[in-house]
Amino acid sequence: MPRAVRMVPPMGFLHVMCRGNNRRELFRYQKDFQVYRLILNKIKNEERVNIFHYCLMPNHVHILVGIDCESNLSLFMKRMNLKYFYYFNRRYGYVGHLWQDRFKSKIVKDKPYFLQCGKYIELNPVRAGIVQSPNDYCHSSYLHYASGLEDMLIDDDPLYLALSSNISKRQLFYRNMIITEEVARTFTYKIKPPS
């Protein structure tokens, strides 16, 4: 049976996800994260794809990308996944499929969803129980926006830039926005509806 045609707008934003085959660990050591980031930076520039938010989880990847008429999202993801597969294969003597199926993507149609998508991506390690706060996870875009940490992968989120012209205030607004979401999620999980 042929694959369904992927809907990719000529311009816009997409939430892209890739998972390790059978939920296999993609990043075993810090060096693996570093290599993935270097590959991602090189290919995003070559394929003219903007990265606004990302999170590299041990067994999957989330990226909020922006594309225009000169971007090629499918080629970007194909090259990215293949190049990392070759690295992983050489490093660990791995045989077989590293990635589970094709990458998944969801079109981000409006500003509220764009904002929520960025927050969802950066809170992923907290929801997975890896860390207590997104501030404790160094493999995402959170520290760039919340603390001003330089990150070669990031093209600044236009909604983030609109928060304030003052950098310190912008970072504070962002931290408060994410913390509010984090507290709300924790509160929701602790309170169970009556049976």
Image (cartoon, rainbow, N blue to C red):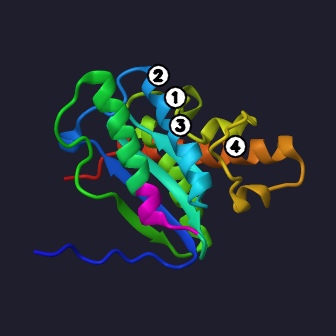
Along the line of sight, the residue nearer the viewer: 160 or 93: 93
Please name the amino acid that badge 4 sits on: Tyr
Q: Which residue is mark 2?
A: 31
Q: Residue at x 23, y 49 (%)?
A: 100
Please indicate whether residue 46 sits to the left or right of residue 58 in the image. right
Give the crowd class for mark 4: few <14, some 14-19, many >=20 residues within 10 Å. many
- Does the CB distance between marks 1 and 4 fall below 8 Å? no
Give the alpha-carbon distance from disc 2 to disc 4, as whole Å.
Answer: 23 Å
Q: Earlier in the sequence, mark 3 or mark 2?
A: 2
Asked which secondary structure carries label 3, the reply is helix
- In which quadrant of the rendered view does residue 149 lie? top right
In the displayed structure, 173 sits above or below 161; it is above
Q: Earlier in the sequence, mark 4 or mark 3?
A: 3
Please indicate whether residue 117 sits to the left or right of residue 168 in the image. left
Residue 19: where, in percent of width, then height? 30, 46
Q: Which residue is mark 1?
A: 34
Please name the amino acid that badge 2 sits on: Lys
- Does the CB distance between marks 3 and 1 fall below 8 Å? yes
Q: Residue at x 38, y 77 (%)?
A: 7
Give the alpha-carbon distance from disc 3 to disc 1, as whole Å.
Answer: 5 Å
Asked which secondary structure carries label 1, the reply is helix
Please name the amino acid that badge 3 sits on: Arg
- Does the CB distance between marks 1 and 2 fall below 8 Å? yes
Asked which secondary structure carries label 4, the reply is helix
Q: Residue at x 58, y 68 (%)?
A: 67
Along the line of sight, the residue nearer the viewer: 72 or 17: 72
Please name which of the two marks, 2 or 4, marks the residue nearer to the observer. Answer: 2
Q: Residue at x 71, y 61 (%)?
A: 159
Q: Which mark is residue 37?
A: 3
Give the alpha-carbon distance from disc 1 to disc 2, as whole Å.
Answer: 5 Å
- Bounds of the magenta segment: 71-77
